Amino acid sequence: MSFSSLALNQCLTDAVKKLGYETPTPIQLQAIPAILAGKDVMAGAQTGTGKTAAFALPILQQLLSHRLMLGPIRALVLTPTRELAQQVYKSFLRYAENTPLKVAVAYGGVSINQQITTIAAGITILIATPGRLLDLIAKGSVDISQLQTLVFDEADRMLDMGFKDEIDRILLQAPKKRQTLLFSATFDAAIFKLSKHLLDDPVLIEVSERNTAASQVEQVVYIVDSDRKRELTSFLIGSKNWHQVLIFTRTKQTADELAKEMCKDGIQSQSIHSDKSQGARERILAEFKQGKTRALVATDVAARGIDIIDLKYVINYELPYVAEDYIHRIGRTGRAGNTGLAISLMSPKEEWLLEAVEKVLDSVLLQQWFPGYEPDLTKHYQAAKRPSKGKQKQHARKKALGIKTTKKSK
Ligand code: AMP
């Protein structure tokens, strides 16, 4: 099936052709007709499946066919992070290239004035993060009362990031009669609860099994002591001559430290997380995309919007505390049909985190040792056997008092 069979305007099919899209992806094949039919949609789509075009193309098509070229704002896309907002905005610009439709993006961390000026000039489509959108509404710069379509992109992450209150406040400003589209990489009880509140008789679309990782991504788990993880990371990148490796840590501090240490190992690395300014994040990301930086060490939130088509390698330096984040992380590679490799470095103490990931994936990941980096299991065995600090103190006190420690009789 081709794009031309999806009843899209020629200027949209020309734009996707120019981008090199030959056939619609499964999510596009299912979502585009449903959205064009005016239905609410709840779509479970992994990152890299082409989900942006799955909602952007029919939104553009509807605006073109109803001749809604100039303001007020008719379509609003909410994203959890600035990076994703930018990425969705760029996609809209590309798809709308041959149309008179005006698109704007608004997110925090940068001056609001430029955004106000752009919006005041008249736009039909707005991509925004929830906090900045509410600021703009409060200032009277954005009016969403004439919305036709409201999109929640990466809705699961929005809930994870605690945007539920912001979402409720935004909904108060939006018309009740509207089309709502909810995209989420993972589905859990919270998402279903949100969908009940937001969607009206939605078409449910799932392009792959629920909560499954991108299928073209090979997943490998190496058991390695935490104090040797950095060494193994640098060794893997260096010995295998990998360029453009995205590495995940759980904290900003670890991201900073790891990037610094890897530079000392001779691997040009940078870290990206929410403590860095928007400008710095953009520059770091651009340098990584251009191949100036070999390894980018990121926290989960910062990595959300990273879209690099041919990114081949993802390393989970630490497994995530939120198991669903594993899917988002490895979804950064294997995008748009490319293959990828996702390596998780798991210390013996982190096994419970892997178990949580396996539950979400509904499959077991093979654990291996990397030659030369085998974990010192005797250390862990002894640690497990060692009595707790409290027990040790109690024992020492009793010894000092000359009390004999005897095992409790049954
Ligand atoms: P997304 O899931 O929207 O982040 O898209 C992932 C990547 O796939 C983006 O870089 C898109 O440009 C690309 N893409 C989207 N749709 C298609 C398609 N039909 N054919 C080839 N690439 C696509």
Image (cartoon, helix red, strand yellow):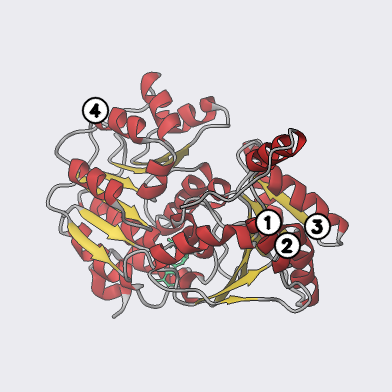
Q: Which mark is residue 172?
A: 4
Q: Element at badge 1?
A: helix
**Can you identify the residue that label 1 sits on?**
383
How far apart marks 1 and 3 lie (CA) works out to 29 Å
Q: Is residue 313 left or right of residue 159?
A: right
How far apart marks 4 and 1 lie (CA) works out to 55 Å
Relative image position of residue 338 (x, y in whole percent): 52, 76
Q: Are the residues flagged by discs 2 and 1 in contact, CB closer than 8 Å?
A: yes
Q: Element at badge 2?
A: helix
**Can you identify the residue that label 3 sits on?**
262
> Type of residue at label 2?
Lys
Mark nearer the viewer, 2 or 4: 2
Q: Element at badge 3?
A: helix
> Type of residue at label 4?
Leu
Q: Element at badge 4?
A: helix
Query: What residue sits 70% from the left and 47% below the top?
Result: 254
Q: Quadrant of the N terminus?
A: bottom left
Query: Mark 1 or mark 4, which is nearer the start of the sequence?
Result: 4
